[in-house]
Amino acid sequence: MGARAKMRVKTGSYLFEGVDWSFQVLQDVFDACEEIALGEFGLNPYTNQIEIISSEQMLDAYSSVGMPLMYSHWSFGKSFARNDMLYRKGLQGLAYEIVINSNPCISYIMEENTISMQTLVIAHAAFGHNHFFRNNHLFKQWTDADTVLDFFQYAKHSVAGCEEKYGFEAVEEVLDAAHALQTHAVDRYPRKNISKRELKARAKERADYEEATFNDLWRTLPGEALKAGFDREASRKIYEKLSLPESNVLYFLEHHAPKLQPWQRELLGIVCRSAQYFYPQKQTKVMNEGCACYVHYHTMQRLHEKGLIPDSAMLEMLHSHSSVIAQPDFDTPYYNGINPYALGFGMMQDIHRMCMEPTIEDREWFPDFAGNGDPLGTLRDAWVNFRDESFILQFLSPHLIRDMRLFRLDDDMKNPMMRIGAIHDEGGYRDVRRALAAQHAVTNMDLDIQVTHVDLDESRTLILTHFQKDNIPLDDAEAKATLSHVARLWGYDVVLKSIDPVSGKVEQKFEL
């Protein structure tokens, strides 16, 4: 289903009736959604490629971190078995679609969906998510949609080749360690994206690179550097080449771990780049889902207004839509924090309201766009220029804070009592907005752990430093388990220190 196809239906005649679908009907639905998305909403998506898959294939893709082209690993099989069991017992539903940020943009939709749901997910994924992927500044900065499919295909073949040559257990041991560290495998500043041809060339040249630059760093055995007359000035220069401190722990191990073989380094590089691909998605969950929900909701409304879908289809869409954006109360068994779909869609709808029917309060808080009469232009600009943290800081209104009954709860581990820190007043609205934005800041979502020191001359001990936030310590069991993976890749002793960034005092220390 390519972009800019012509409509095959006339306004006033239903695109479909009943629940069954055919490929011709899907094409008609796609064309109708495209006319609205491009002609009325002004969206700018990649060319679309829509794939119909079974529920089992959807489970498989869902278990492989949403990437059907992903390489094989036992953890994906474990996830598949668990999700399959819950799905068959009726304890868990499935995603209606999976969409890949690539050019063309690939949307996988389930063959078991009714035609009403197919219409919804085409609007949601093929135009909502697709537009956001193509235009948001984070995705432009961090991912290359033209090469991502080549990379995952290369990664899949590379891992399979290593399994054939070195054995499944050896490959899984490396991947287990890499997966344990993948939240610490992201560059804060983007590196150049690499094509499939360049990836192959890099793999071929890696052995030569190791011979030329790596061996000098580790040419002596621990404790024998001084006996061999090792030049301390040379040691200092080599140390500088390590570029410490380094926040991308897995990248550091890929390039500097003494005992890793070239194929092991290649596996670490694959996991690093995979983590980098998902990095902008992590920072835009609220906006991305909010954009997609807004697009599918208003697309379905326009289809209904045009007389292209029956009332029954609209009611089915509203039922599904309401379930997706529902925000469970904090005292229900289903509560798991703030639903990003609810917050994202709520903010998009609230911006639409403020552009069209602002209150005095809206004009005071948002003079730049309240009452401008252009909700889609305002939203398209936001979808391009913001991520979750900044979007919430700039656009969350007192009106929506009241509607969602948000307030700030102060929970200090040193105080046995919790305190209500912000309520619905002038200062409270700003405090709630800042606190909610901080929860979506990438610096607060991930632990700040850096490689800070390596003993080159003696023991070759690797020192990692964790900078605590809000006096929250590391979990002992998780820290030791993760450190064991670092030690496995490094090949020598590893020390992890957790410090108070203000006082510099070491609060915790783990050694392996």
Image (cartoon, grey):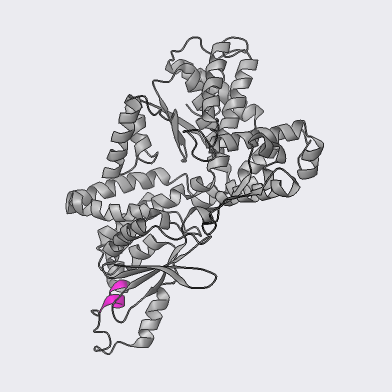
Expressed as whole percent of the image width and height from the top left, the position of residue 3 reads 53, 29
Expressed as whole percent of the image width and height from the top left, the position of residue 131 reads 56, 37
In this view, the residue in front, 122 or 291, is: 291
Residue for point 39% across, 57% down: 475
Q: Give the quarter of the image for residue 357.
A: top right
In this view, the residue in front, 328 or 137, is: 328
Which residues lie in the magenta part?
214-219
Residue for point 37% across, 50% down: 196
In this view, the residue in front, 216 or 55, is: 55
In this view of the protein, can residue 374 be seen by the observer?
A: no
Please name the predominant secondary structure of the magenta segment in the image. Answer: helix
Expressed as whole percent of the image width and height from the top left, the position of residue 61 reads 36, 35
- Image side of residue 324 versus residue 42, left or right: left
- Image side of residue 138 versus residue 166, left or right: right
> Is residue 181 depicted above or below 283 in this figure?
below
Quadrant in which the C terminus is drawn? bottom left
Q: Is residue 134 magenta?
A: no
Q: Which residue appears farthest toward the front when viewing the image?
A: 416
> Is residue 52 depicted above or below 474 in this figure?
above
Q: Which residue appears farthest toward the right when viewing the image?
A: 360
Expressed as whole percent of the image width and height from the top left, the position of residue 454 reads 36, 74
Residue for point 75% across, 47% down: 426
